[in-house]
Image (spheres, rainbow, N blue to C red):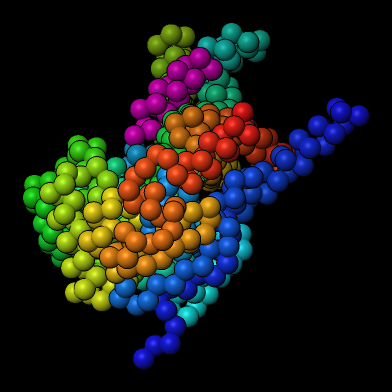
Amino acid sequence: MNVFASTGRLTIDSVREIGRVANFAFRGGFSWFLGPFYWRAVWSALARIGYASLPVVGLTAIFTGGALALNIYEGSLLPNTEAFLPQILGVSIVRELGPVLAALMVAGRCSSAMAAEIGTMRVTEQIDALSTLSVDPFKYLIAPRILATTIALPLLVLVADIIGVYGGYLVSVYALGFSPEIYVNNLIDFISMEDVTSGLIKATVFGFLISVMGCYYGYTSRGGAGGVGAATRTAVVAAAVSVLASNYFMTSLLVDV
Amino acid sequence: MSTHPKISIRDLHKTFGDNEVLRGLDLDVEEGQSLVVIGGSGTGKSVLIKCVLTLLKPDRGRIAVDGANIARQTDRDRRMMAEKSGMLFQSAALFDSMKVWENVAFRLIYADKKTRQQAREKAIDCLAQVGLAPEIGELTPAELSGGMQKRVGLARAIAADPEILFFDEPTTGLDPIMADVINNLIVERVKALGATAISITHDMASARKIADEIAMLYQGRIIWRGRPDEIENSGNPMVDQFVHGRAEGPIQMQVRRDFRTKS
Ligand SMILES: Nc1ncnc2c1ncn2[C@@H]1O[C@H](COP(=O)(O)OP(=O)(O)OP(=O)(O)O)[C@@H](O)[C@H]1O
Ligand SMILES: [Mg+2]
């Protein structure tokens, strides 16, 4: 009886929370289309979220590409590994690993930073101060971050794709002694435009979700340093889970089984 | 002549959980008047002005500003209140990621669409009025003392020449001389601009100086209101106790009794 009651309450609470997040996301997204626009805020968010994430995304991609090449080589039973290694590697990175890993890195790096920053502004009354100065916090704080992350993540994924494939190249050529020409030719022949765009579409959705989670939990945090800490933690978990869950659903749509 | 007061509050209620903060508060402020609200710590003075500023939503009651009820806090009400008013927060609430002058110029740049150069000149002018040198403008809020932060908050509140000014403890944390400078500034602003002001303070010297009228908040209602020269002989034991800062009296008794019943 108690178990049912608490399960029920948990379900209702989660559905409510999802409703609130969706409402928040809608408001955040909607403010893009209504002025005024704070381009300075968009620009600085792009620099912080996009540009500053390049090193961490690049490192993740190059090591993953390298490790993937070794794994494919190790697991291969076919004679012409040299030709199909770049094919498997390219498709895995471009369709799946590039978007998901870049998104997870950005989720860890940026949703926490957003939650902490906005949360601190909330508990120190800076968000109230914004309103009294005739500036809508949604347009000044939330919309620029959501817009910037949604633009930045596909670009970061494009970089991750290139560096990941290059990591695979380095391992194939220098560790496994394969021919560079065969690697490049097979890669270019095999990967289609559709593979790349499907990865970038995913990345756009991930960018939106990550920033919504970071902003929502920051915006709704209360009660001093402890509250901001809790908001930061929740934001990272929610961002990562929503990336992985939405990845599954988008993949099942894009693959059309 | 206008028939309604600038701000008119009727039967205002605000509760947090089971903490009834405002319990049917009534308050009128005439245009151009400077009203000071006094009252013990935690009686809901800050909550009161946050309700008027549409930062907190009252549970019940009516708040009319220039005759328009804003208690429902639609987006339009919020915009209107923000346009009309300037607020000094108790905690200053400066934007810590910006320089001091950008804080003061914030509204001019982001809402009034002034150029950064124009806004900066105005900001430096406002900083001078609160006794801060232009070099201070280049620092960040974290590099300032508490009293300096308060003054920057004040400069930010007055920068756009608002019609209604809210000051939450403007002189707390200032030395007596600077406190007097700030008092004079508030008086001068209200007179020169014909602004309406609501200030909160614990500092009776400041209250006497800036107030046209003083109102005392106690147990969620205004229990006394009068001119500063009347406060010495208010005939109200609660006001007497507060003004003379006595630990013994009706207010303290109340606190002790609450404390006992809770523990
Ligand atoms: N956001 C909030 N959530 C919950 N309770 C609150 C909130 N804001 C204020 N309160 C409560 O409302 C009461 C009044 O708070 P308020 O800040 O208005 O006091 P105050 O009169 O300004 O006191 P002080 O002179 O110390 O600033 C307090 O008991 C406080 O705990
Ligand atoms: Mg207060």
Horizontal side of A117 relative to B196 (left or right) equals right
Work out whether B124 lies above or below A225. Answer: below
Q: Nearer the viewer, residue B81 or A121?
A: B81
Q: Residue at x 47, y 68 (%)?
A: B27
Magenta-colored span = A52-69
Confirm whether the magenta stretch covers residue A55.
Answer: yes
Q: Residue B81, position in %: x, y?
A: 42, 68
Q: Nearer the viewer, residue A205 or A75?
A: A205
Work out whether B140 lies above or below A93. Answer: below
Horizontal side of B134 relative to A19 (left or right) equals left
Which residue reaches farthest bottom?
Answer: B1
In this orientation, does residue A77 appear? yes
Q: Residue at x 53, y 63 (%)?
A: B25
Image quadrant for the N terminus of chain A? Answer: top right
Q: Residue B88, position in %: x, y?
A: 31, 55
Confirm whether the magenta stretch covers residue A102.
Answer: no
Q: Residue B201, position in %: x, y?
A: 33, 53
Q: Nearer the viewer, residue B35 or B139?
A: B35
